[in-house]
Amino acid sequence: MVLVKREALEASFLALYDAIKEVNDHHLLFKTLLGDIRSTLDCIEPLIKETVEDAKELDFPEDELHNFRVQMEEGIELIRKCSKVAPLSTDEKYIYRNKLGQLGKSLQRLLDILKAHSIRDVKKTLVTVKNIETLVQQIDVNFGAQINSSKRIEGWCAIPEPPPLVVGLEGPLKELKMKLFSDEISMLVLTAPGGCGKTTLATKFCQDEEVRDKFKNNIFFVTVSKKPNLNLIVEELYQSKGSQVPDFQNEVIAVDCLHEFLNQTGKNPLLLVLDDVWSESESLLEMFDEWKMPNCKILVTSRFAFPRFGSPYNLKSLSDEEAMALFIHSAYLGDISSHVPEDLARQVLKHCKGFPLAITVVGRSLCGQPIEIWQKRLIEWSKGSSILNSDHDLLVCLQSSLDALEKESITIKECFLDLSSFLEDQRIPATTLIDIWGESYKIDEDWLCIANLCELTNRNLANLIVTRKDPREVDGYYTEHFVTLHDILRELAIYLSSVESIEQRKRLIIDMSGDHFPEWWTEQKCQPINAHLLSISTDGNFSSKWPNMQLPQAEVVILNFQSKKYALPTFLEKMDKLKVLIVTKYGLLPGELDNFPLLGSLLHLKRIRFERISIPSISKSPVQLESLEKISLFMCKIGQAFSNCAVKLVDLLPNVVEMNIDYCNDLVELPAMLCDLISLKKLSITNSHKLSALPEEIGKLVNLEMLRLRSCTDLSEFPDSIQSLINLTYLDISDCFSIKELPEHIGGMRSLEVLNMRQCSRLQELPTSVLNLEQLKEVICDEETRVLWEPFLSVLKYTHVRVVKDDINLNWLHKFPT
């Protein structure tokens, strides 16, 4: 009976597919929407046929199967009506667009379910947990170590995700394929002003079926940016292939290694995308042009044409029809309740110049607003003038939308402007923003910061990326949340942060090349600057001593560097109000940090976050931080920090309540001295794959409320003293594949409310002491582990066991920024 219903679903699908194909070829009014639906159907077709032919069991109810079939049959009727309609009124156009949009969403949901079903079939081929362990062990995230697996690891040089709705790129995509598949072209420059969709088109090109058939897994997507770092580019390319990352002593060696990489990889068809290339990088393109290889194709996206490398491909702005389709999607004009006269919408679109970025941002800012607001915004745009020398029309639109945002929420606008404090084209960790916003805007709950990021994403002012997360799981774990910012939006944020004089700016953002300091800095006569946030970015050639600077009001300092060695600025010690210090070394290898002792003069410092820093020995550089409440170490080298240490850590950090250690792969055993920090309430150690043991002294952390040991794949057991954590309410041991048994006396943790034990598949039984966990409300686990809990649930009447079906996909281990 189920197979009969699936065959009926396939029959309805094929009828809808034929109807779309017939209408889409000659219908102009809804060509974009029909084209999107046809693309979705193209993706569904092989999956639905596979399901029917193999008589596979779909993972959704029969009534939903029936609903999909009914929706397809209704879709067939809708398509037929669209093909026969006479010229429509404005309201009728919106009604049909809305119905076609709903059909597209329904088909997308079916596609998502069928994809998930297909992935689960792959999971079943991994017969034992040992297979998973072997794969994890092959993935050594210790900063460029040799990776034995031949599989391509996504995360480095990975293809970005396109936006939810893409319009107007079908023709350009075909033309790109025609040009790059030609034997005469080895490098093609895709050019257009900022915000026109160059990166989106390059992304769609990499994801195209014909392109993937030709280049297989030999597709690399590298973001070059305005200030390229050749060493980082080469490091990422080697890392993406699972090869040993060379140690570049200078750029000459990096060039040689790049040439060697292309020679080796280019033995098979190779596609290399160089995204966001600026005029300063013309020499880089010259180098690639000299190394032409018959199997290698290079696609360059840039605001500059670079005519010396052949005829560029000029990406045009959207047509009126395409712009209207994208605008309707962004402003939800398909919903009659938010109907706005078409002539008014077209006036708005004139100011967007057919730029997709402007259309989406402006559309979201006007969504749900009354007509009067639309009219007011048009008047403001008509009076607008250039705010930057380039792309001024686009930036005027964006600035107006941002001004409107300020009237709704000044904090959201301030959060947006803070995003400009980080390097261009880099993923910004959400946990970093949590630290900044927590102190700057007194946001006490981490999830409220994430809500702000969601608000910015909803308005198309930023893009929130979650690399691995169960959408139903809300546990305050945001290490796998990142934010990206479009270059144009970053330029706008930097401009708006720089309108006032240097002395009066709220944010002071300094982006340096080599040892070239801004003139105002070297010429100033120790005049105080009132900025509350200071951001300094330096490249790999920076080696100077820091000039003096006075920032008596500064509460947040962000230091971004790329050199192997870096000294903390001496002027930090005079920042009496500093509360947050963020130090990030960009690249794959950790950097050395000097001047550690000056941190001891920061009497009000509450939060420190280090990324890719080699932490020096505490014995050699003891620093007392009495006010410090939170420490975060991300991809840091911390092994030497606690070795042979005679200093009592509790004397240096008496008031730390939260410590986060992520991706610190030289951490083999948690130092016992950390267990002296009895003020700790939250301890999170995640993705530290060599951590094999916890100290017996961990029971001393009697005030601990949350212990997260997620993805510590070598951790196999717990000390008996863990039962002494009587105030622990949340324990996360998910993805700890080596754990064979829970502590015998785990029942001593009488306050435990939530236990996350997903992917702990080597567990064979539970200790009887779990019956003492009277406060336990939820256990999160796999289907296999759920069986272990069933004998105890008659006693643990208030405990709910939630089964999470995880797809086996270890790529999330590598999706962190470089």
Image: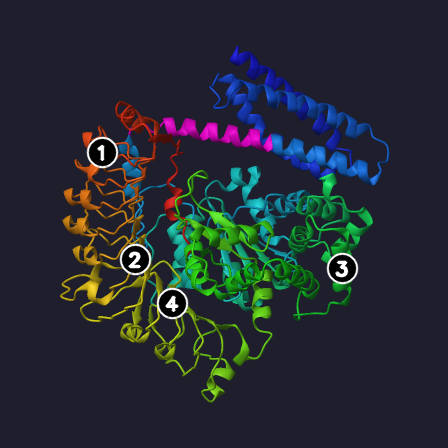
**554 and 443: which is toward the camera:** 443
Would you say 78 lies left or right of 399 here?
right
Question: Which circle marks residue 657 in the picture?
Answer: 2
For disc 2, the neighbor class at 10 Å (few under 14, some 14 to 19, many from 20) is some
Q: Earlier in the sequence, mark 4 or mark 3?
A: 3
For the residue labelled by badge 2, is the local secondary structure a helix, a strand or a loop? loop
Of callouts 4 and 2, the N-terminal one: 4
Kindly identify the amino acid type of the residue bearing the numbered disc 3: Lys
CB-based contact (under 8 Å), mark 1 and mark 3: no
Mark 1 crowd level (few <14, some 14–19, many ≥20, 10 Å Cα): some
Query: x, y (%) of residue 700?
Result: 18, 52
Task: Check disc 1 and give the amino acid type.
Answer: Asn
In-image side of 111 versus 192 (left or right)? left
Tag 1's secondary structure?
helix
Range of the magenta residues?
Answer: 107-128
Between tags 1 and 3, which lies in front? Answer: 1
- The mark lying in front, picked from 3 and 2, is 2
Q: Which residue is mark 1?
A: 772
- By secondary structure, the bulk of the magenta-drawn segment is best described as helix
Q: How far apart are labels 1 and 3 at the CA level?
A: 64 Å
Residue at image position (51%, 83%) is 519
Disc 3 versus disc 2: distance between alpha carbons? 49 Å
Q: Are marks 3 and 2 in contact (CB under 8 Å)?
A: no
User: What is the number of the mark on residue 376?
Assistant: 3
The disc placed on residue 167 is: none
Q: Distance between the Cα atoms at labels 4 and 1?
A: 43 Å
